[in-house]
Amino acid sequence: MDDFIAARSQMALSLGFHIIFSCIGMVMPFFMAVAHYKWLKTKDEVYKNITKAWSKGVAIFFATGAVSGTMLSFELGLLWPKFMEHAGPIFGMPFSLEGTAFFIEAIALGFFLYGWNKLNKWFHWFTGVVVGVSGLASGILVVAANAWMNSPTGFDFVNGQYLNIDPIKAMFNGAWFTQALHMCLAAFTATGFAVAGVHALMVLRKNNIYFHLKAFKIAAIFACIGALLQPISGDISAKDVAQRQPAKLAAMEALYKTEKPAPLLIGGIVNEKNKEVKMAVKIPGALSFLAHGDFKAEVKGLDQIPVNEHPPVAITHYAFQIMVGIGTLLLLISLIYFFNLIKKKSLLDKKWLLKLFVFAIPLGYVALEAGWVVTEVGRQPWIIYGIMRTKDAVTPMPGIAYSFYIFTIIYVSLSVIVTFLLYRQIKMVPVLYTHKETKIKDS
Amino acid sequence: MEYVVITFLCLGILLYFLLGGADFGAGIIELFTSAKNRGKTRKTMYQAIGPVWEANHMWLIIAIVILFVGFPHIYTTMSVYLHIPLLIMLVGIIARGTAFVFRHYDAVQDNMQEVYNKIFVYSSFITPLFLGIIAGSLISGHINVHATDFVAAYIYSWFNWFSVSVGLFTVALCGFLAAIYLIGETNEVNAKQRFIKKAKFMNVAAVVFGIIVFIAAQQDDIPLIDWVFKNNIGLFAVTLASLSLVLLWYLLLKGKTKILRVLAGFQVTMILLAISYAHFPNFIRLKDGDSISLFSAIAPEKTIYSLGLALLLGSILILPFLGYLFYKFQQREE
């Protein structure tokens, strides 16, 4: 395996792994805070049990996310030393703040997990909220650093030198807000659907129905609000990308030729050699509207971009299709769910809706990963857009393939173990949290 | 502001060494505990480090972020030439962190526990070993930026007598710190005795490996003796460390626990000071005789300014909260 490809694969693998764990770590605390609040207010034991059951999951995910994050802070240098040498001082600001946020999260988690019956109950609740808020802040900061790679600012690039560095300006680069918004909503949607789906499955299996219905509702409401808001955020992002990274937008839509007005392509098979797309559904003028808010506007195609600056089109296009397709599906499920909620219909009579949620368990994460593929692969061949090429940043050390193999083994086995642990946690719910009260309610 | 940043860097490294080190040490102690006492040791250990262990490891992140934001050239030189030991250390960190949490949060207590235990204790040994190797390599002068062949550039940079003996020395120090820490964490007389015994053993090991480090330095032409003994601060620090060693043994025999911790922490701090003071602000010594100093590798002023500000702001938020965490979970059994 080529060292460059190995380095990119290792980075993609590490990030792809880390994203899932960090999203769960940053979203679940909010679910817990709601359940915890309800327990403190209503004194219904079931909410305490839900909080405790979720917190065990969070501990597992947080620890895994923390170590894989530590790993990444080293991997940036191990794999891309030339990038870090120049970029470190420029885009380091969000990382140094992230260090603080992450530290606070770890401390608050210590309080939260070990604080039952030891702390004032509202202080204890508050530490849980702090876990969520600082986790979310970490996420936003890291995405701001990534946004800088898409929209580098805060320095002057003169003859290969990086001068007049302004880290604050770099942090508040043009893409930070749109990217962070999109990411946060995605995290809530994906995690919400995954959690809700698992509880829906348990309801269908008739295990501790009362417990699982309550847990389902909390997660599902978060998930559905996220899914409803996501298209708006996606629209803002699309307009942003159209302006700043026309090559990425062209790759997302496999737009080889500049067109005015440009159609929106749905699906299709990309032939990178012949630069064409077959069997796609075309909606006339729709891409012009999405990119520029005008059905007749011109959209830049790849023909206006030098060939050596083209991102891989097929991967970006397919990933984009997957993301949007799943997003639409989750939006529909959300609408149905809210309709149901307003009508106050019992979910127990709507098994098909619960089944839909079960079906959606992995979908949010698939869309989330696809979204990352769009933004990262769509930025290629650049590591700092328009400034430094990815292949110029890679480490001079040979044999990166071996390190890639090692990490593949580690991440695969960690995924297996975490899934196994989660399965065990869920299986133990009836043993750990069944009370007389809930038994009566179940029947 | 650069001094603020450098202070935080040193503080981050020191605290990682003390707190993270004690944490690794707990695993090392478990490794050297007889099978019949392991269960009890594990329980004490979990109570002691459970609530604080995540926080302990944040110091590494703080240090590494300071390095890559504030001293990018140092960070990248380490990343390139010490790629292999860094990688092994990271694998250790991953294995250890996850095994520790998994074994506690596995809802079913079955023979998977043994698997987690094995992973935990061995990675607790490997991680500080390579941490020490990396630290040793930075000052060993074996990093050769002109090397063209793989072995000279990426293996000998860290695989040498000096680096490896610093690694072993680090392991012994971590075990020592943990044993001292754990003595105060149990009220049971037998367990206390056991940890006192471990502390003595680890202390002897540390002294032995310390001497080996000096011999290895001689072997590898590293002027360690000059650094430590030919300047006042170094000499002072070593003298204090040796004096506190005597006091420490005395207190150990008396079984006084609270002061012991302070003393052990102080001793390790003095050792670090003695080794690093003489070549401060040089951070990496290279084979060609050059050094990379903190001041020559420093990022532009504006970066350092905002980094310093972020660190100060962060510590206002972190330190009281962290202090309260340690305080709250100290008063357990009473």
Image (cartoon, rainbow, N blue to C red):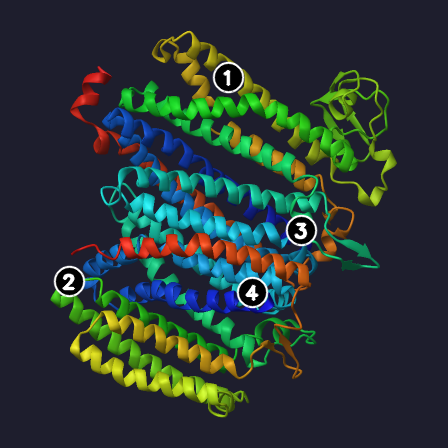
Label 4: which residue?
B5
Q: Nearer the viewer, mark 3 or mark 1?
A: 1
- Give neighbour class at mark 4: few <14, some 14-19, many 20+ (Cα, 10 Å): many
- Disc 1 marks a residue whose amino acid type is Ile
Label 4 in the same subunit as label 3:
no
Q: What's the CA distance linking mark 1 and mark 4?
A: 51 Å
Query: In the rendered view, does B42 fall on the left or right side of A10?
Result: left
User: What residue do we see at 54% from left, 16% from top?
Assistant: A332
Tell me if I can see residue A413 in this picture: no
Q: Count all numbered tags in the image, as a single digit.
A: 4
- A350 to A271, vertically: above or below: above
Q: Going by the image, does A353 lie left or right of B73?
A: left
**Disc ID at residue A333:** 1
Q: Which residue matches tag 3?
A: A5
What crowding class fits label 1: few (fewer than 14 Cα within 10 Å), some (14-19), or many (20 or more)? some
Q: Say which residue appears at 71% left-offset and 39% top-offset.
A: A378
Query: Residue B30: percent from the left, percent from the top?
Result: 27, 64
Please report contact status of discs 4 and 3: CB closer than 8 Å, yes or no: no
Q: Which mark is residue A6?
A: none
Secondary structure of residue under mark 4: helix
Amino acid tagged 2: Asn
Chain hosting mark 1: A
The answer for which chain carries disc 3 is A
Q: Are marks 3 and 1 in contact (CB under 8 Å)?
A: no
**Position above or below: A369 against B11:** above
